[in-house]
Image (tube, helix red, strand yellow):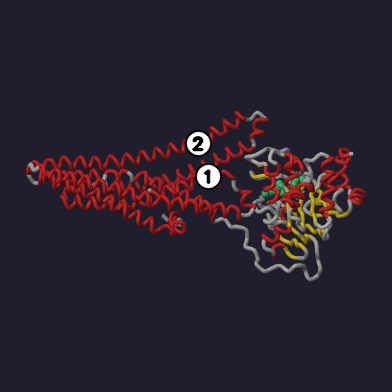
Amino acid sequence: MRTLARLWPYVRPVRARLLTAAFVAVVASCTGLVIPLVLKWMVDGPVADRDPAGVWLGALCLFLLGIAEAVLFGIRRWLVARPLSHVEAEMRAGLYRRLQRLPVAFHDRWASGQLLSRATTDLMLLRMFLAFPLTFLLVNGVTIVAGVVIMLVQDWTLGLVILVPAVPVLWTCVVFERRYAEVARRAQDQVGDLTTVVEESVLGIRIIKGFGRHRTQARAFRELSGRLRGTELRKARLLATIWGVIVTLPEAAIGAALVLGAVRVADGELSAGTLVAFLSTALALRWPVDSIGFLLAMSQEAATATERYFEVMDEEPESADEGAPAPRTAPGGDTGLRFENVQFRYPDAAPGSPPVLTRVDLHIRPGESMALVGATGSGKTTLTALVPRLHEVTSGRITLDGVDIRKMTREELRTKVAVAFEEPTLFSASVGENVLMGAPDDAGKPELDRALAIAQADFAHTLPQGTDTRVGEQGLSLSGGQRQRLALARAVVGRPGFLVLDDPLSALDVHTEAAVEGALRRVLAGTTALIVAHRPSTVLLADRVALLSEGRITAVGTHQELLRHNSEYAHLMSGEQEDSR
Ligand SMILES: Nc1ncnc2c1ncn2[C@@H]1O[C@H](COP(=O)(O)OP(=O)(O)OP(=O)(O)O)[C@@H](O)[C@H]1O
Ligand SMILES: [Mg+2]
């Protein structure tokens, strides 16, 4: 109950309709309870008196009551369908919005399948809960109470007989709820795991096939889905148990009441009409009582789904921006991109492990391009991710033109800084849309063409539909180098003041790389750039080079200087030099 109460803010806007629908359903259900009373009148009156006209009148009444009940239930359906799909859509949009705002560290930690299953299966469970159990637990509750009152009024001894199973049934419900809660949670988590496996194996299908692992993968999947099947079967067993108890005990009570009632009618203590009315009331209550089992099960699943939904919604989003408008330049005239005593450790790193960056001090002058070199795993990618604030520095600070990046809004920061990462990610959209993602909204064809030219990505014009060709997941597949060049075009299209490139040319052949460099040199003239590089050819693009080692910048200078004076740098570059000759 407490968990489900958290749904209230989403349900609030549609509460009037839901309440009306519940009221209509109660009326419909109680209309059904009038039918036994008409039967009683018919049996004791027209039937006993052999009056055909009275029987027809009674039949007409029953017919009208049946129609009324059906129409009312129809109205209820119509009332709830639209608002509930609205609630589901709102919750899904809220979840998506939250996922966009959660920090990168959150996404590092969570399996994507767990997020996917929350956005799909769990929200569907919630809509079903709001449509059925929420209303019908109330409706059935009212119907059962009303029915029991009617039965007690008809004949209180028979009524008490019917009530005997109430205690064991209630006890079963309580035990059931507790056990079902645990299994439902496990099942929903397992669905998330399964989704993750499917997603990963679809994305990694080349690796799986390339290494001939499809059988092992299929076996692993089968094992996981077998485990889910086991959990689902356990759910089914629990449901079967509660259903068995809920159906058997009341039916037995009805049987006992029938025998007792028949005896008393024979003795003349009870009218036949009363017994008919009593039994048909009891039978009318069968569905409301029987359905309690699966209504409770659905509610429990909805509670679990709510819990899983709010696990994501309760995550801390990126810290709010410190609103103060940033001064254009620092008072001291400190310009360019500066790292001051920057320390960083991943929030999810093992406790006690040393930080990735221990003390980084680096100044990149305005308009300068700085190459960042370091052994693999030395923290270059980490350092570049700090500039657009994908991760927050643990201590120290980074300034752009003298302004601490934490003092700017993220939006402002990210229009100033453009990035291209090692993995060139393209979205399922046209080439043009992918590249223009990096530009202000009013950018158009001229900017696109210019960026494609700089990144040597003119191949885009020769695609089947030119720059309107769809690429990415649902479009044309591109080569690694082609994707890299589009990602580079995306980084430069907005003419950013600061450019952060993580090994942007690694997949290009030497000639294309040289051409990109030539074009970049012209662009970079006015841009402050930090470029992670592995190859001397990329390093040569930069004005100076910084060497990252053991979490610090250990040397800064031109390529030639470092090559001569720094043995670590010479070692890093030596193997490569022979390649590029
Ligand atoms: N999300 C993360 N959580 C915890 N540790 C991480 C995370 N990402 C990277 N690391 C660790 O940080 C260290 C630096 O990684 P980083 O990717 O910055 O290296 P790199 O210099 O870019 O290497 P490469 O040249 O291979 O690209 C590595 O030891 C890595 O294990
Ligand atoms: Mg890297």
In the rendered view, tell whether residue 139 sits above or below residue 335: above
Task: Mark yes or no: residue 520 visible.
Answer: yes
User: Which picture quadrant has residue 2?
Assistant: bottom left
Mark 1 C-beta closer than 8 Å to ligand 1: no
Please give left or right for residue 13 compared with residue 347 in the image: left
Please name the residue shown 20% across and 45% down the image: 62
- Label 1, residues with CA under 10 Å away: few <14, some 14-19, many ≥20: many
Q: How many marks?
A: 2
Q: Secondary structure at mark 2?
A: helix
Kindly tell me whether mark 2's CB lies below 8 Å from ligand 1. no
- Residue 377 visible? The answer is no
At label 1, the amino acid type is Ser
Residue 117, numbered circle: 1
Q: Which residue is mark 2?
A: 227
Q: Amino acid at mark 2?
A: Arg
For label 1, the SS is helix
Judging depth in this view, the residue of 417 and 474 nearest the camera is: 474
Q: Quadrant of the N terminus?
A: bottom left
How packed is label 2: few (under 14 Cα within 10 Å), some, or many (20 or more)?
A: some
Q: Residue at 42% of width from left, 44% of height from top?
A: 180
